[in-house]
Image (tube, grey):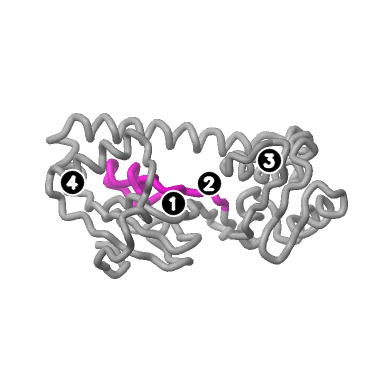
């Protein structure tokens, strides 16, 4: 069972995931219709939902908030594979394989999840074809995202290009107009950003300062303001 304490739903319904993908909606509907006793859980920032190598217990469906999904080497080097957004089904691959969790998932902010045990998930797959199809689509999308992430990390690129590409991705996620500046809240520490681009905190500090001096971005204590998105995209290309 999850280590997080079960909590009654106190937030208004509007605070829950407002626009999950069609496959996640299908899965949630199947869970609700089947009467599975999924746990609604609240987690504070910095909570580890599960760690790499732990015995699999089930899956967490992320309803609100964001988490990091990371792996580590035997030397302790940490790499953030992706930032999970609301609608992500965390631990799904391990649950289906009945294998230890192969990633570590940690909350970046206060999060709400629904937890479904492995046994109940497998029972749902056997009984509900829509749920089985939805899970197949979720796994396919996750594989595509991880492949793209691996490509961005492993292909020859400078740390400067990787950082610029990460900032561009955050701009795209925000859906900002290209002609406008965009303010990105500093949710991540420079150490966490370093883990996302396979670099060091010192390098990230130096690169952010350089971009700031050149007027491409403006770094404040609360945010990173993208001032010249076109220039940032050119740097990202390398």
Instruction: Determine the CA span between mark 1 and mark 3.
Output: 23 Å
- Picture quadrant of residue 235: top right
Q: Label 4 neighbourhood size at 10 Å, few (<14), some (14-19), many (20+)?
A: few
Residue 26 lies, in percent from the top left, at 26, 36
Instruction: Determine the CA span between mark 3 and mark 2.
Output: 14 Å
Residue at image location 37% in from the left, 56% down from the top: 15
Instruction: Determine the CA span between mark 4 and mark 1.
Output: 27 Å
Residue 118 lies, in percent from the top left, at 22, 49
Give the side of residue 143 with respect to residue 175, left or right.
left
Which secondary structure, mark 1?
loop
Specify start and end residues of the magenta stretch as a single range: 79-102
The magenta stretch spans residue 98 = yes
Give the side of residue 221 with respect to residue 75, left or right.
right
| Upstream in sequence: badge 3 or badge 4 | 4
The residue to which callout 1 is attached is 103
The residue to which callout 3 is attached is 165
Which secondary structure, mark 2?
strand
Residue at image location 34% in from the left, 64% down from the top: 42
The residue to which callout 4 is attached is 32
Nearest to the observer: residue 185 or residue 125: 185
Q: Label 3 neighbourhood size at 10 Å, few (<14), some (14-19), many (20+)?
A: many
Which secondary structure, mark 4?
helix
| Upstream in sequence: badge 1 or badge 3 | 1
| Upstream in sequence: badge 3 or badge 2 | 2
The residue to which callout 2 is attached is 81
Give the side of residue 229 with respect to residue 91, left or right.
right
């Amino acid at each position: 069972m999850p280590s997080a304490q079960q909590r009654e739903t106190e937030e208004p319904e509007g605070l829950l995931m407002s626009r999950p993908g069609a496959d996640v909606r299908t899965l949630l509907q199947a869970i609700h219709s089947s009467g599975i006793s999924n746990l609604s859980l609240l987690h504070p920032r910095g909570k580890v939902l599960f760690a790499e190598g732990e015995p699999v217990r089930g899956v967490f469906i992320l309803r609100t908030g964001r988490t990091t999904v990371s792996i580590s080497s035997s030397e302790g080097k940490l790499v953030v594979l992706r930032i999970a957004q609301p609608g992500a089904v965390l631990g799904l691959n391990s649950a289906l394989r009945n294998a230890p969790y192969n990633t570590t998932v940690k909350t970046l902010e206060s999060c709400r999840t629904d937890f479904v045990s492995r046994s109940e998930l497998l029972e749902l797959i056997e009984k509900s074809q829509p749920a089985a199809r939805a899970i197949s689509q979720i796994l396919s999308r996750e594989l595509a995202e991880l492949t793209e992430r691996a490509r961005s990390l492993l292909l020859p690129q400078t740390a400067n290009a990787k950082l610029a590409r990460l900032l561009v991705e955050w701009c795209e996620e925000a859906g900002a107009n290209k002609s406008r500046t965009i303010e990105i809240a500093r949710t991540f520490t420079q150490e966490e950003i370093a883990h996302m681009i396979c670099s060091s905190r010192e390098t990230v500090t130096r690169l952010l300062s350089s971009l700031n001096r050149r007027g491409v971005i403006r770094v404040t204590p609360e945010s990173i303001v993208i001032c010249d998105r076109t220039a940032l995209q050119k740097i990202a290309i390398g």
